[in-house]
Image: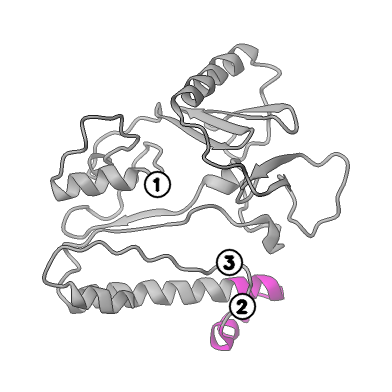
Amino acid sequence: MAIAAVEANRNRPFFLYLAYNAPHTPLQALRSDYDALSAIKDHKTRVYGAMIRALDRGVGELVGALKKNGLDEDTIIIFTSDNGGAWYAGLPNINAPYRGWKATFFEGGIRVPYLVRWPGGIAAGQKPSVPAHHLDFFGTAAAAAGVALPGDRRMDTLNLLPYLSGKPGSDERTLFWRSGGYRVVRQGQWKLQVADNPDKAWLFDLARDPTEKVNLAAREPQRVASLKALLDAHDREMPKPLWPALIEDAVRIDVPLDAPWKADQEYVYWSN
């Protein structure tokens, strides 16, 4: 269907959102993809890898359709994921070396592939230092199309094109995440996570500790307070949820769903 959409719109500007269901549970793959990965001995990991192989093939077919229709140079492709690997997949190293899973805001849950390809507008091999997130799709696409952003409201988006064209970036951007009583702010390389359940704060210096192993909250109370003030100010700007969460589930940070429960395992509650 995606290739048919490209061919049907090859003579006019178009936007295509292609959301692959896999890799995701249920873990299932073609026998041909599974057999091609015989070097992977663990069965579940091999199935997961076979799903990624199918995804890669699908993306390749789409890029081939763009080239076939003469659209490759002028088409921006953004490839990313909505979250890190899930705890319920039962694959303990799926987000290694980072801690956490989908439904947590540890780096394993939010640090995802973010690839931008535009042969006619971006040189290959660019790696901007500015942190980016999904909301930046809007500002980037608007800039590429020459469309001004709305001026009557605050827009939470960044045009990434200058940073993908050799402009020096800055890591001083402030980003926010929230799920129920679990809130997170990143300012520069400092990242604060606070939870209502359990009542806990985690403070990490991502420049020195990108895998979030050393919680500095007890050592840096002033920094915790200043970052929490940013969270509180951000909350005041947000509208109230239109409906309550249907699920509130404990997600252990360092082990998958099928691992035995132990008293000393850290966890957060995820609202969905």
Task: Provide the residue designation for mark 2.
Answer: 28
The residue located at (59%, 82%) in the rendering is 34
Q: In this rendering, would 259 be left or right of 20? A: right
**Amino acid identity at mark 1:** His
**Amino acid identity at mark 2:** Gln
Q: Within the magenta stretch, is there residue 32?
A: yes
Q: Is residue 91 visible?
A: no
The quarter of the displayed image where residue 154 is located: top left
Q: Which residues are magenta?
A: 30-48
Residue 248: image location, x then y, percent:
70, 45
Residue 28: image location, x then y, percent:
61, 78
Task: Provide the residue designation for mark 3.
Answer: 24
Q: Quadrant of the N terminus?
A: bottom left
Task: Report helix, strand or loop for mark 3.
Answer: loop
**Amino acid identity at mark 3:** His
Residue in front for this viewpoint, 159 or 250: 250
Q: Disc 2 or 1, which lies upstream in sequence?
A: 2
Task: Provide the residue designation for mark 1.
Answer: 134
Q: Is residue 176 visible?
A: yes
